[in-house]
Amino acid sequence: MLIFDFDGVLIDSLDEVVLTVYNTATGQQLMSASDLPQALIRLFCRNRFHVQPIGDGILLMNWCLKNYRSEPGKILTPAEYQAIICEASTPIAQRSGQVYQTRQQFIERDAAGWTALHRPFQPLWNALVGRREQPGFAIVTNKNRAATERLCRHFGLKIPSENIYSGDSGISKVENMQCIRQRFGAATYYFLDDSLKNLQELDQNINRQNKLLIPLLAAWGYIGPEDHKLARTSGYEVLTQSAAMEFLSKMVPL
């Protein structure tokens, strides 16, 4: 069975994430990236690859707000990023819930403007749309369900709702994969994600006894500067969109 991450693999949501996380961190209600300092946006985007659950994006944004003038080109090391996350005073589920709430408020103010901040990654997206009646793939994402379903509908992907496993209530990708295993009982699951850290966590937790999950790193999306090399060192294949489409054709025929 083929499993896709959403943000960074199927949908480019970086513009929306920057605005939503900024608004969550500051309490503002800005609706255009042009209202933000460009150096702030660049610094956040350079370090976006570190973020797993989106609630941690608040902490990264707070760091960027403090440092975008003095260190606009800095890329945090894993240890530096972890030190920032360890300073959190509220649980991750609560922080992620705050981001989801801010996102919903954005949608309620301007649904069309919110949607316009997203772009499908092509041509992979259209390849999935062409298989919209097939049940042979699922989405596992740290994004909230309402936003994920809204974007799927808007951009024409008619995936069954039950095949979307989201990050609501702080549910992790590992927990969602356990649910998928119980539901489908497949011999092998191929998981395509642009976050090397997500893949490593899935590998460590799902493959403890048997090799059930094959991690695949997307060569696009929110990739860290060393991720391709580190993925191959870990034994993970790195797929371009063309290679992912070839893989899709084998796994989920038209």
Image: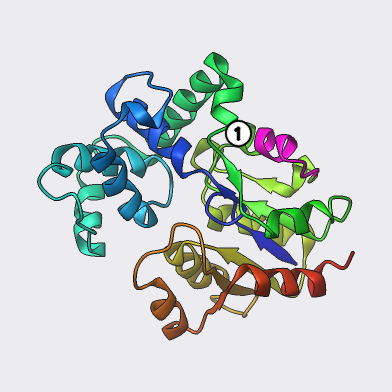
Up the image or down, 80 lies above or below 24; here it is: below
Identified at 31% across, 41% down, the residue is: 41
Few, some or many residues within 10 Å of mark 1 (<14, 14–19, 20+):
some
User: The disc labelled 1 sits on which kind of residue?
Assistant: Ala
The image position of residue 235, as x and y in percent, is 50, 84
Up the image or down, 108 lies above or below 61; here it is: above
Quadrant showing the C terminus: bottom right
Q: How is the image coloured?
A: rainbow
Query: Which of the pair 189/209 is nearer the observer?
Result: 189
Residue 153 among those drawn in magenta: yes
Question: What kind of element bears circle 1?
Answer: helix
For this orientation, the residue located farthest to the left is: 70
Residue 119 among those drawn in magenta: no
Q: Which residues are magenta?
A: 149-158
Identified at 77% across, 59% down, the residue is: 127
Up the image or down, 75 lies above or below 100; here it is: below
Side of 179 where 117 appears, left or right? left
The image position of residue 168, as x and y in percent, is 55, 37
Q: Which residue is mark 1?
A: 147
The image position of residue 96, as x and y in percent, is 43, 36
Identified at 52% across, 72% down, the residue is: 203
User: Overall secondary structure of the magenta stretch?
Assistant: helix
Query: Which of the pair 16/212 is nearer the observer?
Result: 16
Identified at 34% across, 44% down, the residue is: 56
For this orientation, the residue located farthest to the top is: 109
